[in-house]
Amino acid sequence: MQHSKSDNTPISVALADSNPLVLSAMSEIFDRDPRFSLVATSSTAEGFLGAVIRVPVDVGVIDWNLPVLGGQKLIEVLREQANAPRVVIYGDDAKGDLPRLAMSSGAAGFAARNGPVDSLLETSISVASGKMVFPFLDIRELQKDPIFLLTNRERTLLDALSKGSTNRELAKEFGISANTVKFHLSNLYEKLSVQSRAQAIAFYYSSRLPAEAKRTSEFPE
């Protein structure tokens, strides 16, 4: 859902943070800014998800460590929803692995908790207009990394592949047919520019894929 700069309608926002003080402070910041319309707040991923499904919003600002699902799983679920908000991660570890992991998971922006309030607001505005905002990352360089091109499901498959699972075992583990496994493997090999299972596994171990990105998820037929 993109917000046009020529549109004077306030940007609708939903907030989620496990820290009640942070959530209260964010709520006040967005509530008093006429450029935004604060629609919902929650202290859990499930509460946030329920709110934005009932009332779609332009932007969701969330804590990466939201209970119980966590930010990464929440983003995965949102990506399957129609009219899902574009997500900004409001987090610590601004110069560590978190911004990269957030972007590879499908977030549209990152704002540091120890940064100025205006930075969070401007990031939310830019994200609402369709931009990606990761001030501590070179997005163009990351997009050249084959790992960045993988979907969360493909990362999960690559993780299982690295443990030596056969096609039959993969099909059983993910509840899909052998042909569907072959289809996903074909896409995976193409994205990694490899020709075989062994090459894919070798790429996996040389890529230093963040452990947090190796999450189990279901494969649709």
Image (tube, rainbow, N blue to C red):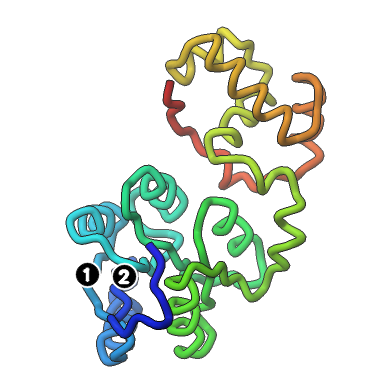
Residue visible at 43% across and 29% down in the picture: 218
Q: Which mark is residue 40?
A: 1
Asked if residue 118 is positioned above or below residue 60 in the image, the reply reads below
Q: CA distance from mark 2 to mark 1?
A: 6 Å
- In percent of width and height, residue 150 lies at 63, 40
Circles 2 and 1, Cβ within 8 Å, touching? The answer is yes
- In percent of width and height, residue 94 lies at 61, 72
**Residue 67 occupies quadrant:** bottom left
Question: SS for tag 2?
Answer: strand
* Amino acid at pointer 2: Leu
Residue visible at 72% across and 67% down in the picture: 138
Q: Is residue 198 left or right of residue 174?
A: right
For the residue pair 148 and 5, the one nearer the viewer reads as 5
Looking at the image, is mark 2 or mark 1 earlier in the sequence? 2
Residue visible at 30% across and 82% down in the picture: 36
* Amino acid at pointer 1: Ala
Q: Is residue 115 left or right of residue 97?
A: left
Q: State the count of labels.
A: 2
Asked if residue 110 is positioned above or below residue 54 in the image, the reply reads below
Q: Is residue 59 left or right of residue 142?
A: left
- In percent of width and height, residue 40 lies at 22, 69
Residue visible at 43% across and 20% down in the picture: 221
Residue with the most extreme front position: 6
Disc 2 target residue: 15
Image quarter hosting the N terminus: bottom left
For the residue pair 209 and 31, the one nearer the viewer reads as 31
Asked if residue 17 is positioned above or below residue 218 in the image, the reply reads below
The local crowd at label 2, few if under 14, some if 14 to 19, many if 20 or more residues have their Cα within 10 Å, is many
Asked if residue 114 is positioned above or below residue 40 in the image, the reply reads below
- In percent of width and height, residue 29 lies at 33, 88
For the residue pair 131 and 103, the one nearer the viewer reads as 131
The local crowd at label 1, few if under 14, some if 14 to 19, many if 20 or more residues have their Cα within 10 Å, is some
